[in-house]
Amino acid sequence: MSKDYTPNMHSAEHILNQTMVRFYNRGRAFSAHIEKKKSKCDYKNFTSNLTEEEITTLENAVNAVIRQNLPVTEEFIPRAAALEFLNLERLPEDAGDSIRVIRIGDYDTCPCIGQHVNNTSEIGQFKIISSSFENDILRIRFKVESTI
């Protein structure tokens, strides 16, 4: 994953991932492509596409978290401590003994190398553009729009 994507889009991706975990309990996206205009997340362990009702529910839930104006913070913790409460499968083997962890209030905690906003109020309005299901993969395409 590149480190030069838009911080508000990447922070929205974290909130979407945690919302998917809470709603469906099938894990975070195994693949994500984050860009300024639109982004996508791919999820395993689904058996069908999302319904329109599910898309609306997801959008509303993500936007509700964004509206909470949660602080987005980073900390560096020892790998051994991170293993106690985080899934580190996706970290490269050479990630080292100090793991960068991003927290979005008390909503999401995740190891990450990307750039983020300082507060969820900087993200904007989250919108799911589309979703699709193919080869046992659920893909969600989304964007964020300025609320100014």
Image (cartoon, rainbow, N blue to C red):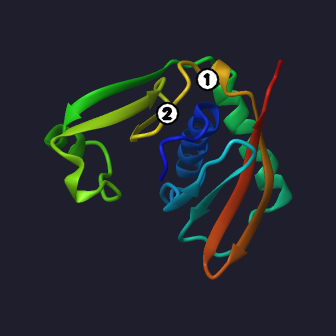
> Which one is nearer the viewer's eye here, 110 or 38?
38
Residue 52 located left or right of residue 63: right
Q: Nearer the viewer, residue 68 or 22?
A: 68
Mark 1–mark 2 distance (CA, rounded to whole Å): 13 Å
**Residue 90 quadrant:** bottom left
Q: Earlier in the sequence, mark 1 or mark 2?
A: 2
Point out residue 138 in the picture as x, y percentages from the top left corner. Answer: 65, 68
User: In which image quadrant can residue 14 be found?
Assistant: top right
| In this picture, residue 129 sits left or right of residue 45 | right
Residue 86 percent across, percent down from the top left: 31, 45
Q: Which residue is mark 1?
A: 120
- Image vertical order of residue 117 relative to residue 88, above or below: above
In this view, the residue in front, 87 or 1, is 1
Residue 26: x, y in percent? 51, 61
Q: Amino acid at mark 2?
A: Gln
Q: Nearer the viewer, residue 73 or 46?
A: 73
At 46% from the left and 26% from the top, the residue drawn is: 106
Residue placed under numbered mark 2 in the picture: 115
Name the residue rendered at 53%, 40% in the picture: 4
The residue carrying pointer 1 sits among few (fewer than 14), some (14 to 19) or many (20 or more) residues within 10 Å by Cα, namely many
Q: Secondary structure at mark 2?
A: loop
